[in-house]
Image (cartoon, grey):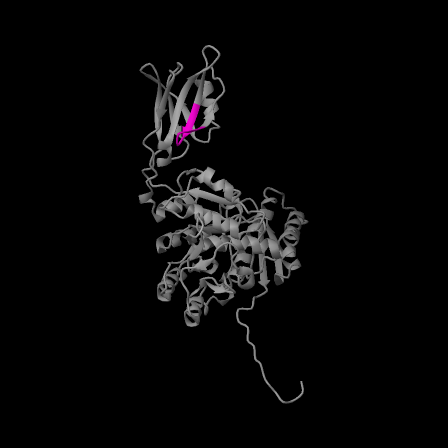
C-alpha cells in the first residue's frame, strides 16, 4: 500500500541529465576526535572544523579531507554536513560533583570519546553569598566560566549551552568548592563497521537536500555498498575513494563488484589518492581523492552556472593538491575508464580529473555512463520533489487547478533553469491527478518528468595534413 501522506520520488531508467547546484550540500560520514553522534553537524568553513570535530588524528583523514575540500572549493565556501561514527561501546567522559559525600551534579562531555578525558570542571565560590561559578578547562586551558549561579538548577541551565559539558542534577543542595577531571571517555572506533556507518548515514535524511556523499578514506566494498544504498534511497551521488594501488586490476576488480549493485548508475569511484602540502614547510600529506572531487563540484558549479558541466579537464585542475600517489599509463587509464573509475592525472603540472563516468554498464546502461547525466537526474528529482511538497493537501478539483499549477511549477523552477544554461536538449513534464485511487489514499498527484541532457566530449580527434596544394 502506498504510504500516505507523503511524496514518493523515483528515478526511471529513461531519465537522462547532469547536475550540480550552487546550493547543494555535501554529506560526510567518518571518524573524528569529537562531535555529535546524534545529529548532523553543519560545517561552514575550514576554520570551523577543529572547533567542531577536534584536532587532526593519525587514525583518520577527516580533518585533512575537510581542509582539501574547502580549499578546492569556491571562494565562498559551500557548507558540508558531517555525522560522526562511533563504535557501539562508546562512552562520554564524566565525573560527579559532591556536596560533602553526596553526589549533587554530574558533568558529562558533550560527545563521546577520549577527548573528554582532558576536560576539568571546577566549582568556584561566587562573590555574592550562596552563589558559585562553574568553570570548564580543556587541556589545562580555561574555556568557559559561568556567571554567578544561585543553585544547581541554574548550573544545569547554564551548561545547556556549553561547548564542552552538560550537567545533570543528582541532588538538591549546592556542590562544594572543588575541581574534578572527567574520565571514562571512549569512542570505540575500532568497532566502527559498515553497519555502524549505515546507521550514521541514515541521519542524513532526504529532506536535507541534494549533494555528494563521502566516507573519507574508506575503500572496502562493505562500506562502499552502504554508501551506495544510502544514496540510492536519498537520490544523492556516492563519492567513493578507490584503493590506493598502482595496479589497475585492484581498482577494476573493486569497481566490477560495485557495478553489480543498485545505485551503480549514480556512483563515482575515484583514484588515485592525492598529495597535499603538509602542515609544516617542506612536508606533504596524503588525502583521499573524494576531497578534491567534492570541492571541485561546488567550485565548477558556481563558476559556470551550468549544472551540466563536468568538473574535469581544464575545470578539474587542482588549486590546493600538488601531486598524486600513483600514475597510470594510457592503456591503464583506458581500462579504468571503461570500468567506471574516474582517474586523475598530472596535466600541465597539476593534478587534474581526467574522466567523468559512473559505474553504469557501458553496454546495457549506456545512457547513464556520464556522471553528469546521473547528477542532473538526481538534482531534477530532488527539486521536483520540493516543488510537489507545496501541493500536499491541496484540493483536486474538476478544473485541475492544483494539477496545472504543480506542472507549471516544475517546468518553471526545475526545467527552465537547466534549459537556460543549455544543460538540456529537451525536457517534458506531465502531472495527472487521481481523485479515487485504489491504493487506499484519498487522492494523488502523479508527476512524470523526462530530461534529455547535453553530452560532453570524452574523445577529441585531430588530423593534421601537410599538402603542396593551396589551402
| Residue 136 seen by the camera | yes
User: Which segment is the magenta one?
Assistant: 135-142
Residue 344 picture location, percent across and down: 46, 62
Q: Quadrant of residue 37?
A: top left
Number of numbered discs present? 0
Rendered residue at 46%/40% (across/down): 50
* Main SS class of the magenta portion in the image: strand
Q: Write the residue at 47% across / 66% down.
A: 365
In front of the other: 433 or 248: 248
Question: In the current view of this chain or complex, which residue is farthest to the bottom?
Answer: 468
298 with respect to 416 (left or right):
left
Q: Give whichever of 312, 54 is nearer the camera.
A: 54
- Residue 9 at least partly seen: no
205 above or below 381?
A: above
Q: Does the segment drawn in magenta span residue 141?
A: yes
The x and y percentages for residue 454 are 59, 65
Q: Position of residue 187 (x, y in %)?
A: 35, 39
Amino acid at each position: 500500500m502506498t504510504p500516505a501522506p507523503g511524496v514518493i520520488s523515483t528515478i526511471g531508467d529513461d531519465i537522462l541529465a547532469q547536475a550540480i547546484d550552487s546550493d547543494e550540500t555535501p554529506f560526510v560520514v567518518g571518524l573524528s576526535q569529537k562531535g555529535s553522534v546524534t545529529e548532523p553537524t553543519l560545517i561552514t568553513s575550514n576554520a570551523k572544523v577543529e572547533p567542531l570535530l577536534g584536532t587532526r588524528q593519525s587514525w583518520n583523514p577527516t580533518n585533512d579531507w575537510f581542509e582539501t575540500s574547502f580549499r578546492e572549493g569556491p571562494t565562498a565556501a559551500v557548507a558540508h554536513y558531517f555525522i560522526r561514527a562511533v563504535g557501539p561501546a562508546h562512552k562520554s567522559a564524566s565525573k560527579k560533583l559532591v556536596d560533602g559525600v553526596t553526589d549533587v551534579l554530574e558533568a558529562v562531555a558533550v560527545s563521546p570519546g577520549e577527548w573528554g578525558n582532558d576536560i576539568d570542571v571546577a566549582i568556584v565560590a561566587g562573590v555574592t553569598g550562596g552563589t558559585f561559578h562553574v568553570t570548564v578547562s580543556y587541556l589545562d586551558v580555561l574555556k568557559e566560566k559561568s556567571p554567578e549561579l544561585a543553585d544547581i538548577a541554574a548550573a544545569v541551565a547554564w551548561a545547556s549551552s556549553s561547548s564542552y559539558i552538560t550537567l545533570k542534577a543528582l541532588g538538591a543542595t549546592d556542590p562544594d568548592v572543588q575541581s574534578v577531571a572527567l574520565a571514562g571517555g571512549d569512542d570505540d572506533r575500532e568497532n566502527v563497521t559498515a553497519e555502524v556507518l549505515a546507521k550514521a548515514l541514515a541521519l542524513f535524511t532526504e529532506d536535507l537536500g541534494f549533494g555528494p556523499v563521502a566516507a573519507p578514506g574508506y575503500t572496502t566494498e562493505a562500506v562502499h555498498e552502504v554508501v551506495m544504498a544510502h544514496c540510492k534511497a536519498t537520490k544523492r551521488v556516492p563519492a567513493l575513494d578507490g584503493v590506493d594501488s598502482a595496479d589497475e586490476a585492484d581498482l577494476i576488480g573493486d569497481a566490477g563488484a560495485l557495478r553489480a549493485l543498485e545505485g551503480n548508475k549514480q556512483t563515482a569511484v575515484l583514484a588515485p589518492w592525492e598529495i597535499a602540502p603538509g602542515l609544516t614547510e617542506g612536508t606533504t600529506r596524503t588525502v583521499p581523492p573524494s576531497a578534491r572531487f567534492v570541492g571541485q563540484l561546488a567550485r565548477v558549479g558556481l563558476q559556470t552556472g551550468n549544472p551540466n558541466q563536468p568538473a574535469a579537464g581544464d575545470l578539474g585542475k587542482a588549486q590546493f593538491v600538488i601531486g598524486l600517489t600513483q600514475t597510470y599509463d594510457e592503456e591503464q587509464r583506458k581500462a579504468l575508464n571503461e570500468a567506471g573509475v574516474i582517474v586523475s592525472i598530472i596535466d600541465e603540472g597539476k593534478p587534474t580529473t581526467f574522466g567523468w563516468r559512473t559505474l553504469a554498464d557501458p553496454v546495457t546502461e549506456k545512457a547513464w555512463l556520464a556522471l553528469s547525466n546521473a547528477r542532473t537526474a538526481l538534482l531534477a528529482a530532488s527539486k521536483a520533489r520540493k516543488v510537489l511538497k507545496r501541493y500536499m493537501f491541496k484540493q483536486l478539483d474538476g478544473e485541475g487547478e492544483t494539477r496545472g499549477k504543480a506542472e507549471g511549477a516544475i517546468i518553471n523552477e526545475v526545467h527552465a533553469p537547466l534549459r537556460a544554461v543549455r544543460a538540456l536538449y529537451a525536457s517534458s513534464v506531465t502531472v495527472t491527478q487521481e481523485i479515487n485511487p485504489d491504493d487506499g489514499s484519498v487522492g494523488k498527484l502523479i508527476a512524470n518528468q523526462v530530461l534529455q541532457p547535453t553530452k560532453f566530449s570524452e574523445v577529441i580527434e585531430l588530423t593534421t595534413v601537410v599538402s603542396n596544394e593551396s589551402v
